Image (cartoon, rainbow, N blue to C red):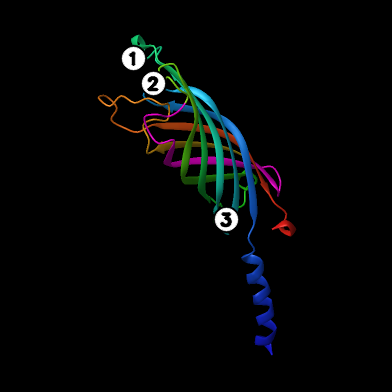
Amino acid sequence: MLCLLLIPTTIVYCQKYHTSKMYIEAGSGINLSYFDIGGGSPGLSIQGSVLFDLHPSWRLGANAGFHRTNGRDEGTPNAAREYEYRSNLLELSVKGVYVVRFKRYPTKKWRKKLEPRVFATLGLLQVHSIHNQQLSTNSNDNGSPIAPFFSGGVGLAYVVNNDLSLVMEGASNISTSDFLEGYTNILHSTSTDMFHTLMIKFIYKVPAAWN
């Protein structure tokens, strides 16, 4: 009789534990691009994600973004060349997030409010348009307009309430292309293009009834 009473309770508990939760993340920030022209010039970045719980600490989902990168040779070792560019990059990727939990430590109010996180993305960058004074057209003529890329970073979320959090994220984005600004120097370029991002986002936990 005791076993019969425990079985339904166990089934209900397991179903609740494995119920998937959906999160919407969105925000904006700046990027610092390190291409063949200029170096570290700030530009606008916008990102949005839809993530699902795989485990209380693991989330996986889709990520989309827009990055306006720009730079100029002024103030760099190539200042005499006087090149400058503005490049628009569209991002579509898969994002995985690991949220650090403090369950094993004594309960503290600040530990309930703060959630460190580590994340990585894998996807594609599309060079949407390039405005480069050295190019005759606004296209990426010297390479493919689509480039695979990988990014990794860390973040810190502040839990406002059960449904809303604010997070700051920093990431490094490494592409397989050396033409994200429409230019490359074959003689002196030893690595592909990369850029860093610093983002401020909100995280909204979608009500269970909508999942």
Q: Quadrant of the C terminus?
A: bottom right
Q: Nearer the viewer, residue 110 or 131?
A: 131
- Image position, residue 130 (x, y; %): 48, 25
Question: Residue at the spot x=69%, y=42% of the render?
Answer: 160
Per the image, the residue denoted by label 2 is 37
Q: Are marks 3 and 2 in contact (CB under 8 Å)?
A: no
- Upstream in the sequence, badge 3 or badge 2? 2
Number of residues whose C-alpha sits closer than 10 Å to that of mark 2, classed few (under 14), some (14–19) or many (20 or more): many
For the residues marked 2 and 1, what is the alpha-carbon distance in whole angstroms?
A: 8 Å
> Among all residues in the image, which is located at the extreme right?
209
Residue at which label 1 appears? 78
**Magenta segment range?**
139-166
- Is 140 magenta? The answer is yes
Mark carried by residue 103: 3
Q: Give the Cα separation between the discs numbered 3 and 2.
A: 47 Å
Q: Position of residue 2 (x, y in %)?
A: 67, 87
Residue 74: x %, y % from top left: 41, 12
Give whichever of discs 3 and 1 has the lower sequence position. Answer: 1
